[in-house]
Image: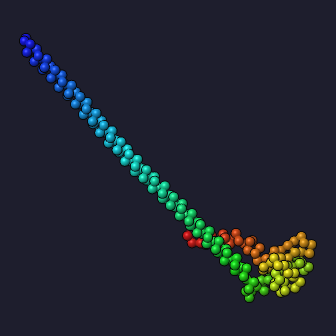
Amino acid sequence: MSLADIIKDIDKSREEQISKINDEYSKRIEELKKSCDSRIQSIKEYYEKKKEADIKTLKKVQEDKIKIDSKSIKMEKRREIVKDALDISYYHLMNITKSKRYDSILNSMVSTAIKTLGEDCEIFASESDAKKINNAKADHKINGGIIAYSKDKKRMLDFRLNSIFENIKDDLASYFYENIEE
């Protein structure tokens, strides 16, 4: 074999090995490329699903927050309405002294006090009301209604208009809350 043939065989063998290595690494590169593409696709799908789930969660959180805010606003509005209704009720009760029926109401208070505490009970009323009631004493702290004490001062009836209102205020508020349309 001549030197040229040996060089030719070496070149041929080298070319075959290079081709074999190229083929082998081309396959590996192709496999890696497919593997990377598959992983990229998998990651894209994962993050797409995660994004959709996050959007749903965020949307749900926002909807819940809106519902809570809406309920808070409604409750605050209801509180305002009830407060206004109580203020109006108080105003009308305190101004009942100017009505035609007030003398009848006052007489009913006095009768109840006498029946409950006895004929000798002590009755206090506003200055103008005391003039309308036999043996009543004027008390500048009373704006309407009466306060009565038994002779021994152990029992008392408080029919002052502001006391009556305080006694029924919670029931009135409950009534108003129950009857406010949402």
Coloring applied to the structure: rainbow
- Lateral position of residue 80 relative to residue 153, left or right: left
The quarter of the displayed image where residue 88 is located:
bottom right
Q: Position of residue 85 (x, y in %)?
A: 64, 75
The C terminus lies in which quarter of the figure? bottom right
Give whichever of 10, 129 is nearer the camera. Answer: 10
Q: Position of residue 124 (x, y in %)?
A: 85, 79
- Lateral position of residue 118 relative to residue 25, left or right: right
Looking at the image, the residue that sits furthest to the top is 1
Evaluate whether residue 113 shows in this view. no
Rendered residue at 78%/86% (across/down): 103
Is 29 located above or below residue 136 in the figure? above
The quarter of the displayed image where residue 73 is located:
bottom right
Rendered residue at 76%/77% (across/down): 161
Is 11 located above or below residue 182 in the figure? above
Evaluate whether residue 6 shows in this view. yes
Q: Position of residue 118 (x, y in %)?
A: 89, 78
- Lateral position of residue 122 relative to residue 82, left or right: right
Give whichever of 121, 141 is nearer the camera. Answer: 141
Give whichever of 46, 120 is nearer the camera. Answer: 46
Q: Position of residue 141 (x, y in %)?
A: 81, 76
The N terminus lies in which quarter of the figure? top left
Rendered residue at 51%/61% (across/down): 67
Q: How many marks?
A: 0
Give whichever of 19, 63 is nearer the camera. Answer: 19
Is 76 located above or below residue 14 in the figure? below
Rendered residue at 83%/74% (across/down): 157
Looking at the image, the residue that sits furthest to the bottom is 100
The quarter of the displayed image where residue 139 is located:
bottom right
